[in-house]
Structure formats: structure tokens, C-alpha cells
Image (cartoon, rainbow, N blue to C red):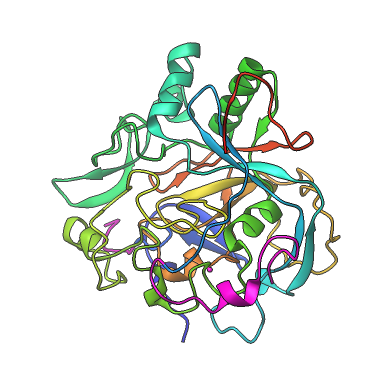
Amino acid sequence: MRPTSYLMGGEFPMRRRGLTLLAISLTAAAWGCGGPSSALNSDKHAASEAVGSTETLNLPHFTNSLGIQFVQLPTGEFDMGAPESDDWSNPDEQPVHRARIERSFWLGVHEVTVGQYRKFVAATGYLTAAEKTGEGGYAYDARTRRLGPVPQSSWRRTGFDQDDTHPVVNVNWDDVQAFCAWLSGEEKVTYRLPTEMEWEYACRAGTSTRWSCGSKEASLVGAANICDASLRKAYPFATWSMDWDDHYAFTAPVGSFAPNAFGLYDMHGNVFEWCADAWQGTNYAGKSIPDPSTPDITDMRMLRGGSYLSLTLFLRSSDRVGLKSMQRNAITGFRLARDAVGDTVPSGEKIHE
């Protein structure tokens, strides 16, 4: 049976399967893993269930002026979505279809960190929506041991320990676009969010399993920062948490868990990641196979990957969640993408062999 506690409680207004989600795995009590033919042998990686057994490919990578590491992902095809036969799948993940990445692109090895976002704010004086409106974002209250909206909260103040190596949160889609625009101007190249298709291709890294590390929940041990015993100690309302302890109650420093075969960290868990696409609440039927972004006809944007607060359901490679672009919370951050021009990066950037 599919877990149902994700339908309970809270005020993270996300949409999925035509329903309004009032918190990704927040309870009412809290508020009151088909690969690219050019790159991988997908059968080998799809069969991997042991913790830390995934091999990483030796792909081109570089570090930009802000210290963000990127890996160049090859062109290829993969099976996008989840089959109806999977009782964890949702209608909006169907039908499974052969998707094609026609252009190589760079993707951030890690989620953008607090320290990297801090450099942007220091250079521009930018105020996030949480700060400009005075309404804040979401934070943890150690006194009540709850997560929820707090007027003084922002990317700077989450109520739980975060240093410059943790993923930035409490940033909405527009705050992310401002960061991309600034960095693009600084480096004279275009930084952007990945499309949903690019994101799933990168997450799967040649696998066709529920998670890139396997299809059993136990495969996530050591591979993802998820709702676990550590969170339950700090946040006792997380009754859906897993029994194991990943040693991080809330966000973890980026790269704390095992990477996938593309060498990407935290594609499952830690924080949800904004994508470029609009979320229309529909399935894949009728979508073209090349990789265009969805037209901007809604104020909902796509989130992928799950978070430290999430059921394993939400960490699946195919899982899709929509969030209003103006919304921000303590479980959502982002990862950068950048178009690849040929197979090189501009001079002056640090290229790793």
C-alpha cells in the first residue's frame, strides 16, 4: 500500500495528482533511483542495491568563479516516468516514455549552498521575498519542536543549524532566478535551473529503479538525507520517519552522502530542488519527446528530489511536485544548470581532469 501520511497537516501548499498538499510529510500535529545508451550499462546500475556500490563515471567537470562544481552530462535517452504497475507511482508520472536529451549540459554537482548564496547577497544587496515582505519563511522552533511559518525566518534564519556548506533554503523561484541572473552577468554565460527532463535524466544516471541507488528503501541508507531517527528526535511529529539514523535531523552539508553514477550528490533528499518548468497538473500524455520547457501558463513550478522531511515516496527519481513560485520553505533549495558550448568551458575556469 502507498503511504498516506503525506496528505496530513501543515502549510507547504504543494500540488500533486490534483490534490493540495499541505506539507510534504508534515502532520496535523506539527501544525496545531532506462539509461543513456551513450554513457552507461543501465542493467548493471539498475541491479545495484548495496549501499555505496554505485560506480561514478569519469565525466568532465569544472569549478566556476563562485566555487560551484559542475559535471558535464552527455546526450542520451532514458525512460522518463514511472509505470502504472508500480503501486507507488502517480498518474502524473505516466505514461513512461522514451525521453531524449539532445544537448549536453553542465549540472551542479551539489545543491547551491548558504555560503554561495551569501556571496550573491553580499555583492548585490538582494533581499529575498521572505525578507522583503516581512512575512518570513519557514523555520524550526526548538521550544515547541515544530516546523512552520515564522515572520523573522529567511535563508539566514531557519531555526536549525546551518553553516555555509548546507543547501540554502527559504528561497522562492524568483529568488533563484535573481541569483541565476546575477551569476550569468558576472561570468557572461547563462546559468539557469535544469528542466524537469534534465533533472530526471541526471538523477537516474542510467538507472530505471525507484531511486538511483535501487528499488528497496534500504538502498537509501548512506545515499540520502531523509526523514529518519535524527529528525524524529528533534521533531517528534515525524511519525512517518524511517528507523535508521543518517545523523542529520535537518539539512546536511552538501555532498555528505554517496553520489550517483554521474557523480551528483543529494539528488535524493536533503532539500527539494526547483526546476525551470511550470507545473500543469497533467501527465506526460501528448508531450513531445525533445526537451522543451513547459510554457509559462501557471504560477506553479516543478520541484524534484524530496527532502530531509520526506517520505521515501517523494525521493523517487520520477516523483513530481508542484509549488507556487512565490512560496518558500525550509525544505526547498536549488541546483544550477548551464548549457555546454562544444565540450569546453571558457578560459579562466578551473577544469578538472
Which residue appears at 56% of the width and 72% of the height?
45
Where in the figure is residue 179, as x and y percent of width and height?
56, 26
Position of 312 relative to 338 (above/below): below
Where in the figure is residue 145, as x and y percent of width and height?
18, 52
Q: Main secondary structure of the magenta part?
A: loop
Which residue appears at 67% of the width and 80% of the height?
83
Q: Magenta stretch: residue 44 in it?
A: yes
Where in the figure is residue 157, as x and y percent of width and height?
30, 32
Q: Quadrant of residue 160?
A: top left
User: Seen in the image, is 93 located left or right of residue 260?
Assistant: right
Where in the figure is residue 43, as x and y percent of width and height?
63, 77
Q: Quadrant of residue 133?
A: top left
User: Seen in the image, is 257 located left or right of residue 19?
Assistant: left
In the image, the segment drawn in magenta is 27-52
Q: Residue furthest left?
A: 143
Q: Is residue 165 visible?
A: yes
Number of dots carrying numbers = 0
Which residue appears at 25% of the width and 54% of the height?
249
Position of 276 relative to 270 (above/below): above
Q: Is residue 279 visible?
A: no
Q: Quadrant of the C terminus?
A: top right
Position of 307 relative to 229 (above/below): above
Q: Magenta stretch: residue 352 in it?
A: no
Q: Residue furthest front?
A: 353
